[in-house]
């Protein structure tokens, strides 16, 4: 027999929204798009309109609600995911990144996405392809 110090996988899953905790499965999670002038990082605490992309097409301030909240355990990492990628149509947008936040809890920040470069749509469709819900790629991961 051996004893190995660790955070239990069951606890990791229980801290995600579909089970318990500050964030609840019935909460509304949103995603907002930001220009390259934005300052977003792990230190971001709440949604802010500062350097958010301008309203265009179906995009408006605050972004849109995410759909299909799920949780999974990949190896020893708990992953939070949404099953539907956010899409804005008829939009002229240039965005460098996004903020996922909980609008039901005073707009508290959940995760920052960095697109790696500016992504542009011109009077067309702008889609954020959310990463696969895996330990290596998921947008929200607890290892």
Image (cartoon, grey):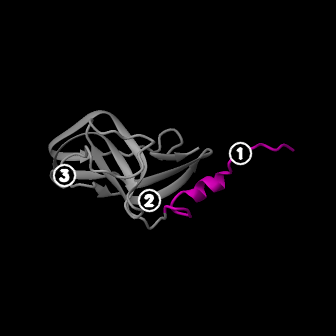
Which structural element holds mark 3? strand
**Total numbered labels:** 3
**Among the two numbered marks 3 and 2 on one chain, the one whose residue lies closer to the N terminus:** 2
Query: Mark 1 sits on what residue?
Result: 6
Q: Is residue 4 magenta?
A: yes
Q: Counting other residues with Cα less than 10 Å from the Cα at mark 1, is it few (<14), some (14-19), or many (20 or more)?
A: few
Q: Which residues are magenta?
A: 1-23
- Most extreme residue toward the top is 117
Which structural element holds mark 1? loop
Give x and y (percent) for residue 9: 65, 51
The label number, if any, that marks residue 69 in the structure image? 2
Relative to residue 32, is residue 81 drawn left or right? right
Query: Mark 3 sits on what residue?
Result: 89
Q: CA distance from mark 3 to mark 1?
A: 45 Å
**Among the two numbered marks 2 and 1 on one chain, the one whose residue lies closer to the N terminus:** 1
- Of residue 32 and residue 135, the one placed in the foreground of this image is 32
The quadrant of the picture occupied by the C terminus is: top right
């Amino acid at each position: 027999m051996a004893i190995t110090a660790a955070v239990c996988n069951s606890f990791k899953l229980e801290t995600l929204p579909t089970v318990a905790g500050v964030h609840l499965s019935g909460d509304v999670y949103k995603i907002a798009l930001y220009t390259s002038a934005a300052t977003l990082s792990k230190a971001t605490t709440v949604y802010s309109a500062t350097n958010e992309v301008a309203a265009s097409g179906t995009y408006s301030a605050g972004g849109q609600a995410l759909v299909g909240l799920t949780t999974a355990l990949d190896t020893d990492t708990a992953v939070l995911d949404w099953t539907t990628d956010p899409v804005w149509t008829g939009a002229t947008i240039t965005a460098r990144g996004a903020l996922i936040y909980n609008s039901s809890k005073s707009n508290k920040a959940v995760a920052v996405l960095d697109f790696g470069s500016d992504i542009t749509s011109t009077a067309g469709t702008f889609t954020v392809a959310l990463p696969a819900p895996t330990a290596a790629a998921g947008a929200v991961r607890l290892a």
